[in-house]
Image (cartoon, rainbow, N blue to C red):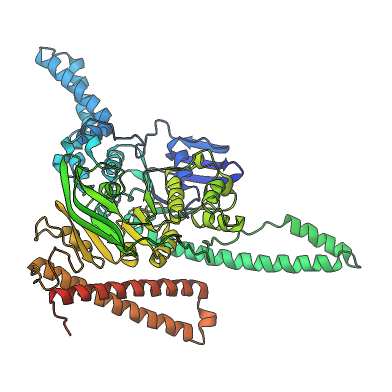
Amino acid sequence: MLIGLSGITRRFGEHEVLRGVDWQIHAGERWALVGPNGSGKTTLLRFLAGKDEGDSGEVRRVRGLRVATVPQDDLAGVKITARAYLLRAFSEVLEKEAELSRLHRKMSDGDTSQGTFHAAAEIQEWLLHHGGYTYEVELERTLLGLGFSLDDADRPCSSFSGGEQMRLKLGRALLDPADLLLLDEPGNHLDDTQREWLGDFLRTSPRSFVVVTHDPEILESAVDRVAYLMDGKLYTFRGDFASFEVQFEEMQKTRERAWENQQAYIERTQEFIRRYKAGQRSKQARGREKVLSRLERVEAPVRSAEGFRLQLAFDDTPGEDVLNAEDLLLALGERRLPVPKLHLKRGQKVALVGANGAGKTTLLRALLGEVDLVSGAVRWGTNVRLAHYDQHQRRFDFQGTLFDTVGGLLKSFNKEMIYSYLGAFGFGGPRADQSVGSLSGGERARLHLLGVLLARANVIFLDEPTNHLDEAMVSMLQEALAAFKGTLVVVSHDEEFLRSVTHHTWAVAGDTLRSAAGFAPDLAEARERGPAAREEGPARDGRDKGAPKPALSKNELFRLQRRRLEAETAVATLTKEKIRMEARFASPDSVVTEDWHSLNRRYEKLKRELAAAEEEWLAVMAQAEEAGVASEE
């Protein structure tokens, strides 16, 4: 056993985050730690890392246990190169190498003693079994897997963007030859290719690890055990993540039946006690009262919060032109990003896409005036009220409580509604009285996001808003943003999320920014038309309506055709699924055979997905018609 938790309890004020948690992790085991937002997963990781002692319980560790976590240090002022930073993971190997070099110099100087030869041989043997001859290869493999080039290894850490620095710190943890690796939401700053690489890395890693993530793609085939944390209790399951989902569903059904049966028994017993406590059968009633007081209660089934809808509102309507920017030049470390022209209209919902490190976050911050432009001008329209979610910023008073913080944003709301908003973002029940300062980084990010959404802004910029949200919260946010009547610009690696809430694309492609109607993630890869940004609208290139439009390149035509076919396929598939589900609703046997709550939730989600797919299809067809691309019957 590497580490064992026994009866661990942890409170924050009146809120009991962990309640008698028992957990053992053995060598070679590969764990996923999952559960709703706010359930205490980060707190539990802190116990495993030895950074929290708790209020009661016992933690046992094997002697000399080495644990690796993603470093919390800020790299903004770190001048050493990325390679030097990552090499810190191999500090023991480098010390052994230095000692071996010292011994070799002694032998070169004529030291032929047996002690020197034995010491050198022992170090060589140790290096052979501890990666002493492969760590450079591992370092380069990790750099490439996390989206860097080998040339990036020689750049100072301070020259990387915030997201790139987070990937460097993740790489440091992955390279650390520790006994136990702990990862908390490692996919937050990775694109699809990098998440796939991380999943492969974990699948082939010989080390034990515990990973917290909402991304099942990272966990697929990578774990052989799952721990589920809910209401302070930990439930453990053997098998991969797909197996866990089946086992958890069965456990839920069993618990629900047992809970419902017990609740029915309690209700019957309480009714008997009320009816006969003062009558001739009072002795029997008192006896049943004792039995009921000693009854070991079955815990209620784990259910996520339902029925809450997040609604975004604003007071002032901005002018038609929300933003105009011309001839911008942004500094991105040692390179420059020119943005010839950018136009944002009222009600427009834009997906800002591009490779990691392309400059998306810098562009948002430049438009907001948070970073200096090399040149160019940004002009905002009238009556614009801005709100900006940047997961690296924490703008709350860390001394106040969650209730006070959110209540200050919802001054016209009653207590129940404030509690509802907090609960929807994973801060339900007694957690409302918890101080902001006691929250983990991910929890502060969620609170910051909630604050931005409640700011009654008519223009919202969101930079990776889904990073710290579970599936239910992402669905809630998706629905709220789709219904939002204001203007929106979103950066996210989640293409499904972007497709459902945006209908326009800005893409950082190569050395410029491109623009297109509809959701067009492939636009970030387009380079054939050079540095000029592609813009929509009647005067997109400074030409009048009658001017001939430039022909699309073969690659752009191919991508447009592919997007059209994908959109048509998506609409057809979702329509068929909607028809099948409606048939299930109409079946006379459905009252008995169907879980109506679950079926209805899936049906509502399907309707939203179909609406988004139809909107994407219409946008692509309009673009195809404009480009003269014929539709295939």
Q: Where, by quadrant of the figure, is residue 294 drawn?
A: bottom right
Instruction: Identify the residue shown where x is 24% and y is 35%.
Output: 157
Front residue (pair 395, 274):
395
Front residue (pair 363, 465):
363
Figure check: 231 above or below 55: below
Instruction: Identify the residue shown where x is 34% and y is 67%.
Output: 500
Residue 607 located left or right of residue 620: right
Q: Where, by quadrant of the figure, is residue 580 drawn?
A: bottom left
Residue 543 located left or right of residue 182: left
Residue 231 located left or right of residue 202: right
Specify whether residue 360 is in view.
Answer: no
Q: How far across and how far down the image is residue 472, in percent?
A: 45, 61
| Number of numbered discs overlaid on the protein picture | 0
Figure check: 64 above or below 208: above
Q: How far across and how far down the image is residue 522, in percent?
A: 19, 62
Q: How far across and how far down the image is residue 382, in percent?
A: 35, 57
Instruction: Identify the residue shown where x is 63% and y is 68%.
Output: 260
Front residue (pair 322, 180):
322
Position of the C terminus by quadrant:
bottom left
Instruction: Identify the residue shown where x is 45% and y is 43%.
Output: 440
